[in-house]
Image (cartoon, rainbow, N blue to C red):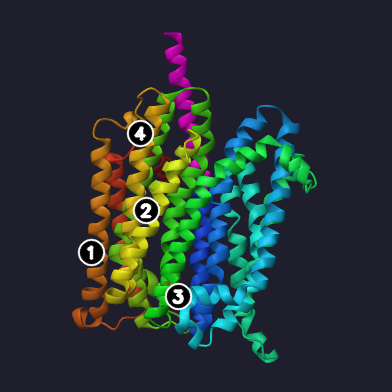
Amino acid sequence: MQNGIQEESNLQKETKQLGRASFGAMLGVLLSRASGVLRTAVVNATFGLSHSLDAFNTAFRFPNSLRDLLADGALSAAFVKVLVDERAKGKEAEKELIQVIIGFFLFLTLLIAFLTMIFSTPFMQLIGGNQFKNSGNLELASQLFKILGFYLPLTMLNAVAMGVLSVLGQTFRAMNSSAFLNVGIIACAVCSPFLSHFSINPIYAIAVGAMLGAFFQMIYQYIPLYHLGLLKLPSFNVLHWIRYKPLHTVLILMIPRGIAQGALVIALMINTYYAISIGSGVLSYIITAITIIQVPIGLFGVATGFAAHPILTKAVNEGLNKKFSSLLTESLETVLWLASITTLSFSLLIVPFYSVLFEHGKVTNYDTIQNSLAVCSYSIGITFAAGSKILLNAYYAINSTKQIIYNAFIYLILNATLSSILAPKYGVIGLGISYSTSTAFDFFLNYYFLKKNFQKKYFGDNPYIAGGKYFNFKIIVFAILSYLLGALGIFMTNKFWKNIENILFFKKDFLLNFSFLTIGGLIILILSYLFIIRMGPHNLKNLVTKFKKRLIH
């Protein structure tokens, strides 16, 4: 009896800890991703959706994808699990792990950076195809790629720091640090016209800004680690690498997600190829759309998964399957609720949102409509991408990651097939639906096989049992709702917002867009609050209630 009460008390404590860590991570991601949207607005307004910006986006997609592999993916997830184990052995073991990981991956990423310098032109030609070469952007993209390749070592160092900060509970600092990248690009974009006086293409400025931002992000993240005495000089001793078992564990844990991320990088290259083939500016539309939808994916999926990972790992290590199930289902349901509310907001208000934020400088109303269509079609995948972030961390927590590889290859094949069919006929909408459908399929594969693998390891226990007997039905409802809301958004953009001046007999200007955005946003906020209080998951109700109290007082 006493053990049951103690276990229940511990579960409540862990749930509160997860809530606090998730909230800190969400605030950090909100700052980071919101600054990313501002960055996109400034860059688009400065350069327009032009060939030069397409060249930068093409050059930056590969190193940025590897950043996802390191910071939001394989290295971060594998490192956190091993770090939790090493911390239990004492501070010296913890410091040694950090020292070896930094040394090994710094060497590896520097090697990749130098290879990008040597093979930048053939690699860019492979991604862009003949049309990209004929547009004259191949040489510019190749030169930018040589600079941006060195973004990798910096972002690797940042990924290690993020992992340590996560385990220490400093999730806000860990997740807000990407804002430095965005601030660096914004500052250099604003100053970019000065390069024209020296006969230098101004687009080089934002490549330099990305490097400066990543550098200052590294300084910001390593300050607390230095003060805690966790830093040693990186270990470049190859024999030490060979003999050090925790490094081997990290690498083994990384392999499945690394291969999976490799499949996603290939899918991204395929999407880039089709985007360039559709026409000038289309790649920039897609980059902008992805930047926008990454805000909720990061805010809900990455932040919650990042905060949940060490707690889920601890629950598994302690053999507390009930706690694991409760934390997993609570996190998953919270994310799906928030993702659905966001998709609804995009479907109804994406055009005024985009107009207010982005339609400045060289960005036109035509760009607004095309970008809005891209956002609506890509936003269908928000629910599935955010949910998968939670599930992938659960795979790492139970040390069962092989399935991630199979799922990723299915994602790659499906994405490539759908893109080849839909992109030529439906343009940006086709690419968005390809992404969203592939992401949905990936989510359901992750969801199904997590249950199977968990039951194999833990004698038939269901990892979703704490969600109740209707939990699977809820997941299906959220999935169907995502597609309905995406279709509504495409319809609203094409039939209402595109013809708003003819329908309302008002000239579409900043004030009208701002009014729609403010009033519509307030209505959605009130309705969302009422639905959450009445039907939402426990953690989300508490979060909303606390936020309301702070707002009132």
- Disc 3 to disc 1, C-alpha distance: 23 Å
- Disc 1 to disc 4, C-alpha distance: 35 Å
Q: Three-letter amino acid code at disc 3?
A: Ser
Q: Earlier in the sequence, mark 4 or mark 3?
A: 3
- Where disc 1 sits, the SS reads helix
- Please give the label number shown on residue 284: 3
- Disc 2 to disc 1, C-alpha distance: 28 Å
Q: Which residue in the structure is indicated by mark 1?
A: 488
Q: Earlier in the sequence, mark 1 or mark 4?
A: 4
Q: Nearer the viewer, residue 350 or 74?
A: 74
Q: Which residues are magenta?
A: 1-25
Q: Is residue 328 left or right of residue 471?
A: right
- Disc 2 to disc 3, C-alpha distance: 27 Å
Q: Is residue 13 magenta?
A: yes
Which one is closest to the eye, mark 4 or mark 3? Answer: 4
Q: Three-letter amino acid code at disc 1?
A: Leu
Q: Nearer the viewer, residue 363 or 448?
A: 448
Evaluate if marks 4 and 3 touch, with contact meaning CB atoms under 8 Å apart. Answer: no
Q: Which residue in the structure is indicated by mark 2?
A: 410
Which one is closest to the eye, mark 2 or mark 1? Answer: 2
In this rendering, is residue 274 above or below 176? below
